[in-house]
Image (cartoon, helix red, strand yellow):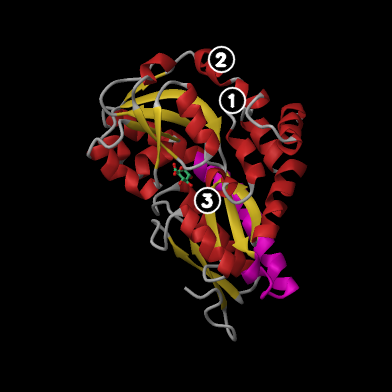
């Protein structure tokens, strides 16, 4: 678990994340490794630990802070508990479409967010596409917000995810992603919400047969390096890391697109029923997030900037 395993020959960085190796985000991380090896002419490499083997998103972020894991990829949700500005990205129906999403994240706003974590020893390298999140349930379908009333829905542990589910009438249950399959199976929760590739690769679709495509938010994943690790690299090595990450993000977009299509096919073939609800009903109940949820000027300004961005 040390950051640089062989100082003299190849500098090997550890990369830990919580998704399965069949996931398009993992494929992005593999592309990152290939680019780093190519750019550095074999002087640098990455050891990838998937499946949450080194801990939950929160735990791995803490390992980055102390320098015992070099890099990770977490949901912006997990990052928001370390850098509050990230919370803005979870606002329901904030991004108009994928084009808007990428122009914000690949532009100044995204770059500023990536830099923001430095004061908590977490430097962002790039964003990965994590699609839009929608509800899936076990016992009964959700076709409109009122169908969520009384249901226990697993959420990620950030304030927006919790309040979002509350505002739709359900009971939010924060829990790590790795614990969710068993929780669904045992009826600890009645459902969850996620993008299609995560719904599929986690095998949650074996338990939940209803998918309500309300697409309540586009929450990106963030690739990060601990500043403790970064400081130990030469400026040339740092450049390779930044460049390889950016290149992998471009490739990951394609992996994502393919995985989304493939996942929907797998879900269909497995008997999962899809519902395409009237999103305006969900939008109406969550509109207040843009205007009334945050009280601080800083975050209200980011929301304004995102909304005004082309
Ligand atoms: C997505 C995201 C993960 C996150 C997961 C979750 O799959 O990519 O980083 O852990 O959602 O719901 O917890």
Between disc 1 and disc 2, whose residue precedes?
A: 1
* Spatial separation of the CA atoms under disc 1 and disc 2: 10 Å
Q: Looking at this view, is 68 or 210 the one in front?
A: 68
> Which residue is denoted by mark 3 in the rendering?
74
Query: Which mark's residue is nearer the viewer, 2 or 3?
Result: 2
* Spatial separation of the CA atoms under disc 2 and disc 3: 29 Å
Identity of the residue drawn at 65% across and 66% down? 227
Give how far across and how far down residue 170 sits, in percent: 40, 25
Q: Which mark is residue 93?
A: 1
Q: Quadrant of residue 171?
A: top left
* Residue 34 makes an appearance in the image: yes
Identify the secondary structure beneath mark 2. helix
* Residue 144 makes an appearance in the image: no
Identity of the residue drawn at 68% across and 60% down? 242
Extent of the magenta region:
227-256
Q: Which mark is residue 284?
A: 2
Give how far across and how far down residue 9 sits, in percent: 58, 84
Identify the secondary structure beneath mark 3. strand
Label 3 lies in ligand 1 vicinity (Cβ under 8 Å): yes
Give neighbour class at mark 3: few <14, some 14-19, many 20+ (Cα, 10 Å).
many
């Amino acid at each position: 678990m040390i950051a640089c395993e062989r100082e003299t020959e190849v500098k090997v960085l550890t990369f830990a994340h919580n998704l399965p190796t069949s996931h398009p985000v993992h494929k992005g991380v593999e592309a990152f490794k290939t680019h780093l090896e190519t750019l550095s002419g074999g002087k640098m490499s990455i050891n990838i630990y998937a499946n949450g083997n080194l801990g939950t998103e929160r735990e791995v972020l803490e390992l980055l802070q102390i320098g015992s894991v070099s890099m990770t990829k977490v949901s912006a949700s997990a990052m928001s508990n370390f850098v509050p500005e990230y919370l803005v990205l979870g606002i329901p129906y904030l991004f108009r479409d994928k084009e808007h999403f990428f122009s914000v994240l690949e532009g100044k706003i995204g770059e500023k967010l990536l830099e923001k974590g430095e004061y908590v020893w977490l430097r962002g390298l790039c964003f990965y596409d994590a699609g839009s999140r929608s509800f899936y349930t076990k016992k009964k379908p959700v076709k409109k917000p009122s169908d969520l009333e009384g249901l226990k829905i697993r959420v990620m542990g950030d304030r927006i995810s919790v309040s979002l589910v509350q505002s739709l009438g359900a009971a939010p249950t924060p829990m790590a992603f790795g614990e969710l399959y068993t929780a669904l199976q045992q009826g600890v929760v009645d459902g969850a919400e996620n993008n299609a590739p995560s719904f599929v690769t986690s095998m949650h679709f074996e338990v939940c047969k209803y998918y309500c495509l309300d697409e309540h938010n586009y929450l990106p994943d963030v690739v990060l390096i601990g500043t403790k690790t970064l400081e130990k690299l030469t400026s040339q090595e740092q450049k390779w890391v930044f460049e390889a990450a950016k290149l992998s993000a471009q490739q990951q977009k394609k992996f994502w697109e393919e995985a989304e299509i493939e996942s929907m096919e797998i879900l269909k073939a497995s008997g999962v029923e899809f519902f395409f609800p009237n999103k305006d009903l969900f939008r109406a109940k969550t509109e207040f997030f843009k205007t009334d949820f945050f009280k601080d000027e800083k975050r209200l300004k980011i929301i304004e900037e995102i909304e005004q961005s082309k």
